[in-house]
Image: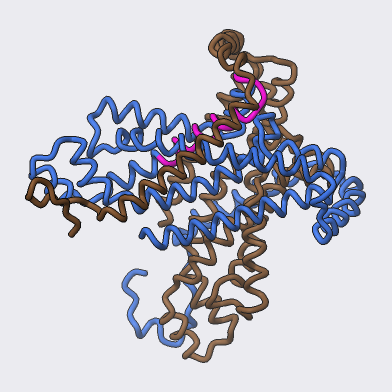
Amino acid sequence: MPVLEKEGAKVWRRRTQGEALIRWFGWLIGVAVFVVCWQRISESTTWFFVWDAPRIADDIWTRATPPRWEYITQLGRPIWDTLNIATLGTIIALCLAVPVAFLAARNTTPSAWLVRPIALLIIVSTRSINSLIWALLLIAIIGPGVFAGVIAIAIRSIGFCAKLLYEAIEEIDQTQVEAISATGASRWQVMAYGIVPQILPAFAGVAVFRWDINIRESTVLGLVGAGGIGLQLSSSLNVLAWPQVSLILIVILAAVVISEWVSAKVRGAII
Amino acid sequence: MSHRELDDMLGTRWRKPHFVTNPMLRWGLIAGFVAYLVAAIATIEVDWGRVYEGLDRGWQFILAFTKPDFVSRAGDIWEGLLESIVMTVAASVIGILISIPIGLGAARNIAPLPVYVICRGIVAVSRALQEIIVAILLVAIFGFGPLAGFLTLSFATIGFLSKLLAEDIEAMDRVQAEAIKASGAKWMQWINYGVQPQVIPRLIGLSMYRIDINFRESAILGLVGAGGIGATLNTAFDRYEYDTAAAILILIIGIVMALEYLSGVIRARVQ
């Protein structure tokens, strides 16, 4: 126990002197890094605009209120598109994620040396790139529109779904699989009766969870031209129609809250 | 499965139990789902001619990954990447520092009701608004540049970390905290010795995860003018410089993988 001799009495301390020194040094480096980073941000900031910000914010607020409620009649189709992007994207992603997950899980992969790294690479690379970047790329390739949004959401979700699924597959109860294979079941029968029933709840949970996230992401895909309500947001922003912007933001907020509520309800019912 | 005797079941074939037991509900769900799917696919306009034309460009993009061009735009890439990293570091530090008091306030077993309501409100607002929308508003208020991105990421970090920290505090072991309180500790000492040791491993793990997310998000903030590598990437796509875009994407994936590996190591050490 580290103690400090102080006027002949021993006082308890949490760390020895060496430990404290190392920690102090670590904090010093951390603070230094932060200061350097802050300095760089500060250098490339026009501080006049920042001091002026409260006035600008107030100005935008007065322009944006009250929202232009009658504009909502034009938002029906974009909302439907947004919903479709999220739902169809999730469905396609799940179809692609299931085989990837089985190839990536240690206990089901056909070859741990060849196939598993490829599956893991697919998971990491699709996961680490945001759906907006995928959308940007797909718009350059297949042209703007809802279809590019669906594919962007699908690609982005593969990694997420496959990662959670393969972790679920790795955590299954092996005794059930053994029981099925002991009956003389083939590889596919073991899969269908030993593994799939165990991961079905996880699968449903992942699907709903990702759908919820995809609703959020698909609301902004339109900013780069991939359809949905973001398209309206971007065109309203471009013409500085702030009352429309505030209405669209309210609609997006409502969509996010509703989708979160639905997903929480469904997950509660499944698990 | 009501009371069926074993004798009745002998000789009949075993059938897999259904996922949804109520047949009305099951068929209703399937029918509704199919109807939605048909409606959704019918409303998506896909210009197959355009897609076919684009396939060639898509193939070129995939080819670009085999020979990414790090050199010809090295200056821009380096600038953008550095700005992304700087934004990530600064925003993570500030976000984590602010989210700790808010997380404490949002835990019902520590905070009094008024504080709890306010903190939960902040968390809810921060979680409901997406990074990119916050970035658009902040760019409009503070002007272009990494400051808007930094503020956006800090704001998003607060919602994420505070919520998870508060949930962790609510799930902590009361006995330890009470033991500290019984020794006559003041409020700060109580938090420091009774609560903090229980939640710090998870807090470190979550912070690492959030740094990872912040870097990924910082890659898209440039699309709306909030600084970072996104602007460079967008320009590369607009100019059809796929080899440069591929280089940037490879760098992003590489950094995310490195961060993920690092956070795995750190989490394994603290937990």
What color was chain B assigned in the picture?
Answer: blue
B160 falls in the magenta region? yes
* Vertical order, B73 against B201 (above or below): above
Instruction: From the image, give the main secondary structure of the stretch colored magenta.
Output: helix
**Depth check: A7 or A127 in front?**
A7
> In the rendered view, how is the structure colored?
by chain
- The residue that appears at 81% across and 55% down in the rendered structure is B68
Asked whether residue A36 is in view, the answer is: yes
Chain A palette colour: brown
Give the position of the C terminus of chain A as an image quadrant. bottom left
Coordinates of residue B10 in the picture (x, y in percent):
41, 86
Residue at horizontal 44 percent and vertical 85 percent from the top: A179
Direction from residue B170 to residue B141 in the image, left or right: right
**Where residue B209 sits: x, y (%)?**
49, 50
Compared with A170, A126 (above or below) is: above
Tell me if residue A226 comes above or below residue B14 in the rendering: above
Q: Name the quadrant containing residue B3.
A: bottom left
Magenta region:
B142-161
